[in-house]
Amino acid sequence: MRMLGIFAVCVGCFLGGCTATRHWDGPEVEALIDGGGAVESGMYRGMPYIMASVNGSEPMKFLFDTGASFNIFTPEAAKELGIKRDGYAHVRGASGKTKPIIAATIDRVEFGPVSMGDMIFLIHDLREVSPYFADEIAGIIGYRGLEAYTIDIDYPNRRLAITDERLDPRAPDTSVFYRDPFGLQWVPISFVDPDSPRHTRMVWCMLDTGNIATFDLMHDAAEPLLDYTRASDGHESIGIHGIQESKTMAPLRAGMLIGQTRIEGVNALLNDVENRLSSNLLRNFRIRIDGKSQLVSFTRADNARRLVSTRRMGITNLWILDGYRIDRVIKGSPAYLMGIRAYDKVLLIDGHEPTAMHDKAPYWAADPDTTTITVRIHRKSDDGWVDVVLPIDGSVEGIEEKEPINEKPLGIEVEMTGTDGKVIRGIMTPVEPVDKKEQAAP
């Protein structure tokens, strides 16, 4: 086995970042379609994926990670394709620990309008990073080699396109980015100055669509922005090398701006390596990365200018079953004290029916000056509903604990329509509310 050169490469994946050491000048890229076009794509657990053909194979599902300049095969995908190792890379996590990972050179990878040759792939079991990676994921494809194109990642519509379209630098949601030596994009993110709310602080953050769990800030950048009185330790972070690290998390003292949208209630994981803007904050944005002009834009279909944290109010997120239902509730939070529990059906949010913009999204749109959000919960016992007014700042002062809105000895009755059109009925037993300490989780 041979090792080639020394080259530090960032790879962001799901729970944390890492670097690898191996020389690679990048792939050779050819256009298959003039002007670019859509890629067969979608979202997997909140991260974008694309369907790509490797050496003429049938298309396989790869996560598309803007925080990666190397690419990854799972061992199963490498075996299926007959990929042979030809080297290795040393992967270093935020703790400084390293681990060698097998590498291979691939002749041809095709997806959407491009064909990429001379591709370097690491061969690594993604389940070492997280058990949530299923066998259907063949690996990860990074941004490297696509610098001449515009990457259009539309989270709400679950699609990705590669085009020659250039962004307008005069558009209000557009800003410049810089590309580091490894080909990764660093975008300017503004934070409301907690000591002077009329001003903002700007921090350069890596755009990392392959990280779904946390928003990361380096210690120096975080120092004036975080509320350390509410910090909690022991939060697990696992890099692509599979080495687990324990880190500190704390909430921002004020809001942050992505494009023209202010987001409140964000928690940041302290990082020793880089600032990372991840998919958990971006999942309701449309992001366009114009590599040729070095411009990036962040827009929302609902034109929301303020998003507030549902976790701060006590709700982890919503998910779709026979409607929009509560995922989990944080014990001791406003939502818990007012009787909301897991699996409760949400009918309205501030008078509007939930949409795909609320599915698994931990931030909801709110009016600029409001201090509360009203959530209408379906009451199964009498087929009615209850309006619950939740304080956006998460305060529980003056709230008297109420009985659960939908308490049943055996759980909550649900029904959904299967793929065959049949209605399936059943009972789901609510999980125990998560502990208050999990309110600091992102």
Image (cartoon, grey):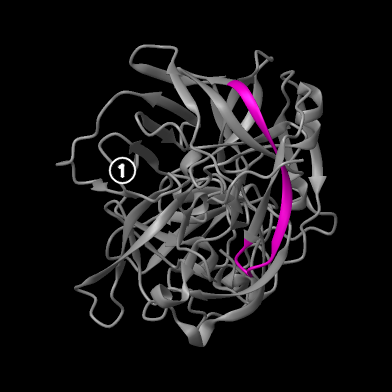
| Left or right: 35, with 386 as reference point | left
Q: Residue at x 35, y 12 (%)?
A: 34
Percent of width and height locating residue 442: 56, 63
From this viewpoint, is residue 417 visible?
Answer: yes
Residue at the extreme right of the image, as rendered: 410
Q: Quadrant of residue 76?
A: top right
Give the total number of marks visible in the rendering.
1
Q: Secondary structure at mark 1?
A: strand
Residue pointed to by mark 1: 296
Percent of width and height locating residue 385: 57, 52
Reply above or below: 127 against 228. above
Q: Residue at x 63, y 62 (%)?
A: 93
Q: Magenta stretch: residue 106 in it?
A: yes
Reply above or below: 307 against 31. below
| Residue range (magenta) | 93-108
Q: Nearer the viewer, residue 145 or 370?
A: 145
Q: Nearer the viewer, residue 18 or 137?
A: 18
Reply above or below: 30 against 330. above
From this viewpoint, is residue 398 visible?
Answer: no
Q: Quadrant of residue 222?
A: bottom left
Residue at the extreme left of the image, as rendered: 170
Q: Nearer the viewer, residue 92 or 335?
A: 92
